[in-house]
Each structure stands twice: as structure tokens, then as C-alpha cells.
Amino acid sequence: MSKMLSHQVKVELMRAVTWRQCVIWAALILVLPTIQFLLIKENYVYYRQLDLFLRLNSNFVPLLFPIIMVLVYAIYFVGEQKNHFIPYVRIRIPLATYLFSKLVVNAILSFLIAFLMVFVPFIFSMYIEPGLGIVHLYPADGNPIPYTTFEQLLFLGTLPYGIIYSLWVGLNGMMYATMGLLLVMILEKPFVALSIPFMYYLLGNFITQILGYEQFSPTYTIFPFSISQQPLWTVFVPFTILCIVIIILGFYLKENLYKHYD
């Protein structure tokens, strides 16, 4: 990373990390899992403490995941475009460096928020809630335990499983946020641009369900708690496609950079 880019990334991070933004990010991390916990704590039978964690990552977060990710940082770039801030920036810094610094900061922040959205509920479920005793565990008594994808990693230990899985969600969150910001930089209609990652996510789920390949759906490969355990390699299929889409968008922006901002 060049000195100019490194400096600009630091500048953008300092601009982004304000008290107001920290409150918003804390809400993204804590509010949805808290609401989910209040809804599920007495309405399900739990055989393992891990079952609580799996339930906490159902419903709200999997459904809204791409929307949450573009709300972390990408949406604020729209204001700079509308206020014609970018032409003034080009006087003191190359346009490519400025936009790439935005992409780097967006990737860092979205990764951290997505990671914490999963890791904080994991810590609560596995290490805090048992001391509180809010949720009662029942003996399985021969009932089938719903093992899910990524539980193959439990042989490493509970905490490594939680960290690795949270890193996986963070990585996917970063990719959806990157898609959103690239599209905002490319398209002239920011609302459409920010909506495309969510539409891509929904369309991927729809197509895989229609074709009978739900194990490859974007949702189930990030939040695999409503499907039986699948081989770990399956999660990389939609992720690879997502990476290819982002690479194509990145090359398109690079080749047409000055057409969009002249």
C-alpha cells in the first residue's frame, strides 16, 4: 500500500469512526440479536447451548444481511456524490487513490461489524447465558439433534469454532458491502445501486431453491441453521461466484473511472 493511499485510508477511518457512527454500529450489532433473543428464549426446546446461538442467528440477520452491510459505510458515499464533493477532492489527491481508500475502509468496517454481529451473540450464548440461566436445556432423550454446517469445526474447540465461523460471516459481509459501494461508484442511481446486493442475495436463494440446490444458496452458506449439515466445500461455491462478480465490477470501474467522474 503506497504512502498516499495508506494516509488516505487513515483519514477516511478517522472521518468514519465518530460517536454517532459508533452508536449506529452498536445498534446493528446488538439490537437485532437482542430482539431475536426475546422472541426465542421461551419458544424453543434447546438440547445444547449451541442451539441458542444457532437460533440467535436466524430470522432477522440472515434476511437483512446485505442491507445491513451497505448501511455500515457504503450508504454515506452517496452524500459525497450528491454534494459534488469528489471534484474538490481530485485537486489534492488522485481520484483512483481516493476511491480505493473508500473501498478499503468500507471493507475493514463491514468486516468488523459482520464479525461482531455473530461473535457477540456467540460469546453471550456460550459463556454468559449459562451463568444467567435464562434458557433451560433439555435432555435429548433420543430426539435427533440438528447438526449444522461448520459444526465440523467443533473438534478444534468451541471458541475456535465461534471465531472461524464469525470470520466467515465477516468475510461475506465485507464482500456484499464492497459490491454495494462499487455499484454506487458505477451507477448514477444510488438507491438502485444499494439495492442490487440485496436483490442478488434474494435471487441466488430463489434460483437455488427452484433448482433443488439449496445447499448452495447465499443464505444457507452464510447462515446454515435452517438446513441439515452440508460438506464445508459447499459454502465456497456461492462465495466464489460473488468474488467473480466483485472482480468484474472492480475492473469495470477501473476502466471507466474518469467517464463516471469527469
Image: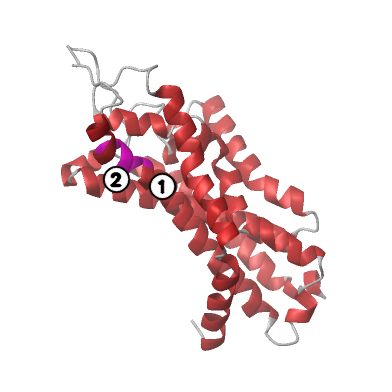
- Label 1, residues with CA under 10 Å away: few <14, some 14-19, many ≥20: some
Quadrant in the picture for residue 41: top left
* Residue at x-position 53% and y-position 52%: 25
Residue 162 bears which disc, if any?
2
Q: Which residue is mark 1?
A: 236
Quadrant in the picture for the C terminus: bottom right
Report the residue at 26% width, 38% height from top.
126
- The part of the chain drawn in magenta is 121-126
Residue 245 in sight in this render: no
Q: Amino acid at mark 1?
A: Phe
Q: In front here: 75 or 136?
A: 136
> Horizontal and vertical percent for residue 178?
58, 58
Residue 165 visible in the current orientation: yes
Q: Of helix, strand and loop, which one carries label 2?
A: helix
Foreground mark, 2 or 1? 2
List x then y, in percent, for residue 135.
Answer: 30, 24
Above or below 257: residue 246:
above
In the rendered image, residue 86, in percent from the top left (x then y), is placed at 76, 74
Residue 150 percent coordinates (x, y): 30, 40
| Residue in the picture at 61% in, 44% down | 67
> Which quadrant holds residue 162?
top left
Please determine whether, in this image, residue 169 is positioned above or below residue 147. below
The answer to whether mark 2 and mark 1 are in CB contact below 8 A is no
Q: Residues within 10 Å of mark 2 (few under 14, many from 20)?
A: many
